[in-house]
Image (cartoon, grey):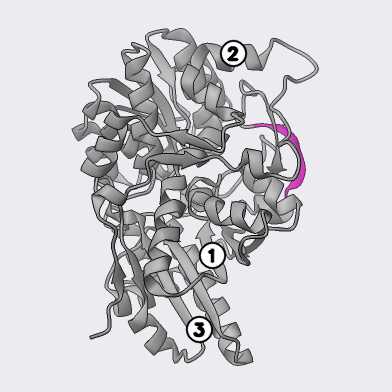
Amino acid sequence: MKVDRFDLPPDEHPDRWYNILPDLPEPLPRHKDPPEGPSRLEFIERVCLKECLRQEFSEQRWIPIPDELLELYIHAGRPRPLYRALRLEKKLGLKHVRIYYKREDLSPTGSHKVNTALAQCYYAAEEGREGVVTETGAGQWGTALSYAARLMGLKCVVFWVKSVYDWKVDRRTLMRLYGAEVHASPSDVTEFGRKIRSENPEHPGSLGIAISEGLEYADKHEEFVYCLGSVLNHVLMHQTVIGLETMRQFELTDDEPDLMIGCLGGGSNFGGFILPFAGEVLKGKRECEFLAAQSWAAPNLIKGEYRYDFADVAGYTPLLKMYTLGHKVEMPPIRADGLRYHGAAPIMSYLRHKGLLKAVAYAIDEREVFEAARLFVETEGWLPAPESNYAIRAAIDKALEFERKGEEKVIAINISGHGFLDLFAYREKLGL
């Protein structure tokens, strides 16, 4: 019998997050204030979680996961399985290439975002906050924070990119079922949202605009604290439970990944997947390559400049050193809206700048990534999120390339979320 699933028992769940910063060859560039205007660093200290800001540039390689939070991770279904894609390999005619995928879609809300949502809501409750406020693009982060807030007895306010809010009706319902207050962004709730709407009443919104609205809301409601779902160092660190589990699971397969692939908008799922492996590459303990799959709607790692920029449109955040398209860039809406962000996480940007991370982008019409998803559903049976389809497309392309060359390779993919609340996009893209 061929076993294609590799599981860890709950008592083998990682009890620490991995922080890659001490293992970088040089210090990661610090966030900083712009040359003019009020201090954004002081602003962030006022509206964000104190413990998360302490973790942001921590020099500890391993940061313990609190026992209560570890219990919540296990309650939410961690550890999650690693699969060998035997049926997909057969369909592609692979003889030299093996493909594995990590199932982050199996969380209660359908994505990896729960890993940091639970952590941030745990710390918000510890700080005595009444509620959390955030932005969301594809809706996965807003749903995860709504879920985590409800478990911790907190209120939750979500500003959701309008173009996605309008078509993801069922995900909006799920957020509200968890008790969240959900607003299409740009909204009439904040001054910045009203400004954008006055300039363009039909503005489709963007993640950068929604971040600005969430930050403004937190600033004006001191009982709330702002939580970010991607980009910042502590967010990627919380997600390293993915990579730490995967590393242990590969020990069960008698294989080692030669190439790890994930979709990348801001960088949270891909960072969580690869950072434990990247740390070992930096220390000379393993050989592995890393490939980020993006959309040409927002190819920040490919077309962006490595420089300081704001993480939001209004410029409320400190300046982050990252690959950026510019915080005010206009980006066309796509169905994989979680990939439509102007900047890549500073850690991922640094790895790209140092040549440890490569990137590929796919067309804005998304046909080829949804065709890859169709093949994945037909062979493996799981329905991935639109964002995850980019990783699947990249993995198929690389597998066929290696096969043509006769190269023995092992590819690992992170399936960052499921697509059950994205079926409208599947009907549209595949004519179903």
> Who is closer to the viewer here, 432 or 52?
52
Q: Position of residue 58 (x, y in %)?
A: 59, 29
Check disc 1 and give the amino acid type: Met
Label 1 belongs to which residue?
260
Check disc 3 and give the amino acid type: Val
Q: Which of the image's four quarters has the C terminus?
A: bottom left
Check disc 2 and give the amino acid type: Phe
| Sequence-first tag of 1 and 3 | 3
Q: Which residues are magenta?
A: 304-310
Residue at the image position 29 percent from the left and 58 percent from the top: 8
In this rendering, the answer to whether 295 lies above or below 121 is: below
What is the spatial separation of the Cα atoms under label 1 and label 3, in whole angstroms? Answer: 13 Å
What is the spatial separation of the Cα atoms under label 2 and label 1, in whole angstroms? Answer: 37 Å
Q: Residue furthest right?
A: 35
Residue at the image position 27 percent from the left and 45 percent from the top: 109
| Sequence-first tag of 2 and 1 | 2
Quarter of the view holding residue 428: bottom left
Q: Nearer the viewer, mark 3 or mark 2?
A: 3
Q: How many marks?
A: 3
Label 3 belongs to which residue?
97
Question: Could you say which disc has been placed on residue 226 in the image?
Answer: none
> Who is closer to the viewer here, 5 or 45?
5
Q: Nearer the viewer, mark 2 or mark 1?
A: 1
| Sequence-first tag of 3 and 2 | 2
In this rendering, the answer to whether 420 lies above or below 130 is: below
| Residue 224 visible in this rendered orientation of the protein | yes
What is the spatial separation of the Cα atoms under label 3 and label 2, in whole angstroms? Answer: 50 Å
Label 2 belongs to which residue?
43
* Numbered disc 2: secondary structure: helix
